[in-house]
Image (cartoon, coloured by chain):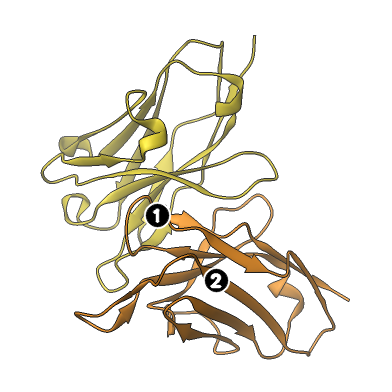
Chain colours: A yellow, B orange
Amino acid sequence: QVQLVQSGAEVKKPGASVKVSCKASGYTFSGHDINWVRQATGQGLEWMGWMNPNSGHTGYAQKFQGRVTMTRNTSINTAYLELSSLRSEDTAVYYCARIGYGSSTIDRWGQGTLVTVSS
Amino acid sequence: DIVMTQSPDSLPVSLGERATINCKSSQSVLYSANNKNYLAWYQQKPGQPPNLLIYWATTRESGVPDRFSGSGSGTDFTLTITSLQAEDVAVYYCQQYYNTPWTFGQGTKVEIK
C-alpha cells in the first residue's frame, strides 16, 4: 500500500535550518509530485510548495521563497524539505503529501514531522 | 492568492442528522477548458494527517462512505454528511488547486450535539 514515512521530531534554535525526509513506498516514486504542507498547533493547513521527483523541478509559495528547498534522492525514493533561517513562527507539523493522478490534488499524506523552534 | 472561506467555524450536529459545510472561494476555481472545479475536501481527526474525501468538487475518493457528498461550482461549494456518525467528528477543510499557492479554508469543526 502507498506509504509516506517521515523523519522524527526536531528541535531547532532560531536562525538554524532543518531538513525533513519523506520516504515513499508502495508506488512509483518518480510518477507523482510531492507537496509539502505545514500546520501550526491548533491552526489550519498551509501549502509550502511542490516538487516533481522525476525532473527535480520545484515550485514554492512566495512566502517561503529564499528559505525553502525541496529535493529528492530517487535511488532511495525519498523527498526532502529544508527550511532555513528558522523563527518561532515556523514551529509546526510538516507534512509531505503525494499528488494523485485522477484527482490532481493531494491523495496521500505522511504522518507529519513536528519541528519546534525555540531558544 | 485565492482566499477560501468556510462556514460555519463550528457545527454541532446530532447523531444521524445532516451536516452541511459551506466553502466560498475569492475567485472561480472552475477551469473552462475541461469544465472541472479544482476544489477538494479533507477530513482531519486529532493527531492524524488530513484524509481526502472529495475532489473535482463532487467526486468521492475511493473508500469514502457515500454519506459524504460534495456539490457546487465556480465559487460556492458544499460538503454534506447525510447521517452523521460518531466517527465523523473531525475538522473539515476545503482546498483549491486551481492555481498556486494552493490554499485551504480555515476549517470547520464538526462535533456531536
For badge 1, the amino acid type reads Trp
Say which quarter of the image contains residue B44: bottom right
Point out which mark residue B76 bears. none
Residue A32 x, y percent position in the rendering: 23, 56
Residue under the point 52% across and 79% down: B77
Mark 1 highlights which residue? B102
Of the numbered discs 1 and 2, the one sitting upstream in the chain is 2
Report the front residue among A83 and B96: B96
Q: Is residue B65 above or below residue B110?
A: below
Name the residue furthest right.
B113
Q: Is residue B109 left or right of residue B39?
A: right
Q: Is residue A97 left or right of residue A55?
A: right
Residue under the point 49% across and 10% down: A15
Point out which mark residue B24 bears. 2
Question: Do callouts 1 and 2 point to residues on the same chain?
Answer: yes
Residue B76 x, y percent position in the rendering: 52, 79
Report the front residue among B35 and A92: B35
Report the front residue among A10 and A60: A60
Name the front one of labels 1 and 2: 2
Question: Mark 2 belongs to which subunit?
Answer: B
Residue B78 x, y percent position in the rendering: 57, 81
Q: Quadrant location of the C terminus of chain A?
A: top right
Say which quarter of the image contains residue A69: top left
| Helix, strand or loop status at disc 1 | loop
